[in-house]
Amino acid sequence: MIPREVIDDILSKADIVQIIGSYINLVKRGNNYWALCPFHNDRHPSLSVSPSKQIYSCFVCHEGGNVFTFVQNYEKISYIDAVKKVAKMIGYSSPSLNVEQRRVDDATKGILSCLKDANEFYHYVVFTEAGKHGYDYLQSRNIDNEMINYFSLGFSPDNGDITIRQLRGKNHSVDEIDQSGILIRNANTFSDRFQGRITFPIYNEYSEVIGFSARKIDNSSDDAKFINSPATKVFNKSAILYNYQNASKEARREGYIYIVEGFMDVFAFYRAGIKSCIALMGTAFTSEHAKILRRLNVPLRLCLDGDDAGQHGILLMTKILDEYHISYQIVDYHGDKRDPDDIFNQDGKEKFITLVSKLIKKNDFLINYFTNRHDLSSIDGKKDFLDDVIKNYSSFSDDIEKKLFLSQVSSLVNLDISSLKELFKDKKVDDAFAFGDFRIKKQKLTKIENSEQHLIRYMLQSMEAVEYIKESSIPVFIDDIYNLLAKYIIEYKSEKPDIDIKDLINLIQQTGGDQKMINLLISISEMKDMSPYSRKSADEYIDVIQKNLSDKEFLNQFEDAGKKQDPLLQAKLLDMRIKKKRQ
Ligand SMILES: [Zn+2]
């Protein structure tokens, strides 16, 4: 545990503008800083960061919080890890920060340890007699011992029972092996899903094995060539990137990272001396991938296969990358339809390096891509070509780039540059507002919620309001979230009468409160046109709540009062209810 004083100290010393600014681009406007919100598909700056309050909030998706919640939600890490990360970023050191490991629950810990043991076992087997045909296969694909070790490749014995017995010998229960995605249940026996296959471990960003991809080595059976771990607590197919554990370190050193389709391509890059390379493993590129890659903060080099499927994959990928404002270049295959592995094997290292070093921007890629797909000798073909390029092009980084691009398109479709200029207007950043699909509507509040929010706002503003609501003889809040929020405010104010929102958020986080409550708190704290607290106006809101109670909510309150053996409260509730019915 990190002592609370240490956490409070880190929070008071960290500057939210500096920390958030190290993740995303902030622009100062008025008293606040603004950025594209990383928590929804934002194209127009919607996230504001307040240096005076040390909080951020998005007026579109309503995500908000303090410096810890930002790092936690942006990096998708635990609260404690976010605290440590912030401490590291501001150069804060304390002995209590170093002792704790990443916090995962016991079940997850068991699964990770089981996968680690399985991986060690497979890796051991590949060098033994039981793994000989796996080893021979790897050699035949030019994967030598050094690479087998670097990528921790292995072989699962033909008899899958051996793996299960091995793992049980390491004190993993059948359930745990099952939850790790390794176990197959037969009629009376257990077996290993990957038996008789080469194993390629897949790691998460903490360099922990989270699952496997496994390749069969003989083509005699109809079984799939590759199988992957099923979805488990730790294995999420839409977010995995093969070789991320090695390549992420290399990427920071090299300043780029290649993205390819399969492991064999990663191995080809490795043999060419390029270690900063990851593979999508046969899945489509998703926004989850984009979020992981954005953290690396290096330009991507897209190098999917040269065939139609690969090049189409690149086109789709650029859309997601543009949405996430991730910079990238594209390897220019120049019509070569092979994959990187074939190119390396057939043309050799030097030609391979020359090819993957030829990088172009998206707009050039579009010209190549659509030139190959339309017949530019016909008018229809030219029109389709223009339509497709116009639909997909990105804004130009400068005038010269735009002029060169237009002159190239002009020569392809025989249209003069001035007519093209009209068609290729600079895209405005707020274009996306026209689509409107990403906007999360602010929910219309019920009368009860509206009153609850005003009462919470009073509590934030005034100690008197806190006392009044705390001492109220009838229950004030109906919804649990407001009830709990009120308790947090009471707890906070028992120590400090003036509320500092970032500290209150921290208190909520420390005791396991959720992001929804933090977002709610921020939106209440930013409510406009509020009258100052008075006992009379608080009573009015409490009255609105009581008047709008459903019969069920009333009965709940009445029963609660009964359980507390408070007949006076019961009488009072009944009285209010009768008055309400008469109105
Ligand atoms: Zn947002």
Image (tube, rainbow, N blue to C red):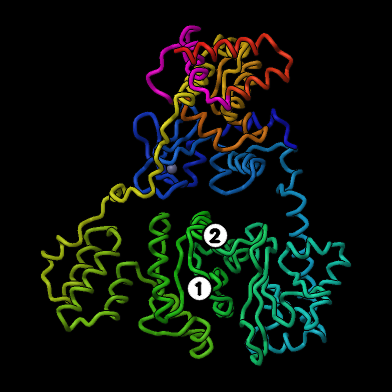
Left or right: 116, with 214 as reference point: right
Q: Residue 67: percent from the left, percent from the top?
A: 55, 36
As drawn, the label of residue 260 is 1
In this view, the residue in front, 139 or 475, is 475
Picture quadrant of residue 526: top left
Q: Does the rendering let one see residue 374?
A: yes
Is residue 435 depicted above or below 353 in this figure? Answer: above
Residue 115, horizontal then vertical, whole percent: 74, 65
Amino acid residing under circle 2:
Arg
Identify the residue position indicated by label 2 in the image: 252
Could you tell me which secondary element the residue under label 1 belongs to? strand
How far across and how far down the image is residue 51, in percent?
46, 30
Q: Is residue 192 left or right of residue 79?
A: right
Crowdedness near tag 2: few (<14), some (14–19) or many (≥20) residues, C-alpha within 10 Å: some
Give percent across and percent down for residue 408.
21, 73
| Position above or below: 379 against 67 | below
Q: Is residue 394 magenta?
A: no
Q: Nearer the viewer, mark 1 or mark 2?
A: 1
Question: Label 1 crowding class (10 Å Cα cut-off): few <14, some 14-19, many 20+?
Answer: many
Is residue 538 located in the magenta-colored stretch of the structure?
A: yes
Determine whether, in the image, residue 339 is placed left or right of residue 392.
Answer: right
> For the residues marked 1 and 2, what is the alpha-carbon distance in whole angstroms?
18 Å
Q: Residue at x 45, y 35 (%)?
A: 57
Kind of residue at badge 1: Val
Read off the magenta span: 527-553
Residue 408 in view (yes/no): no
Quadrant holding ligand 1? top left
Q: Secondary structure at mark 2?
A: helix
Q: Earlier in the sequence, mark 1 or mark 2?
A: 2
Who is closer to the viewer here, 226 or 70? 226
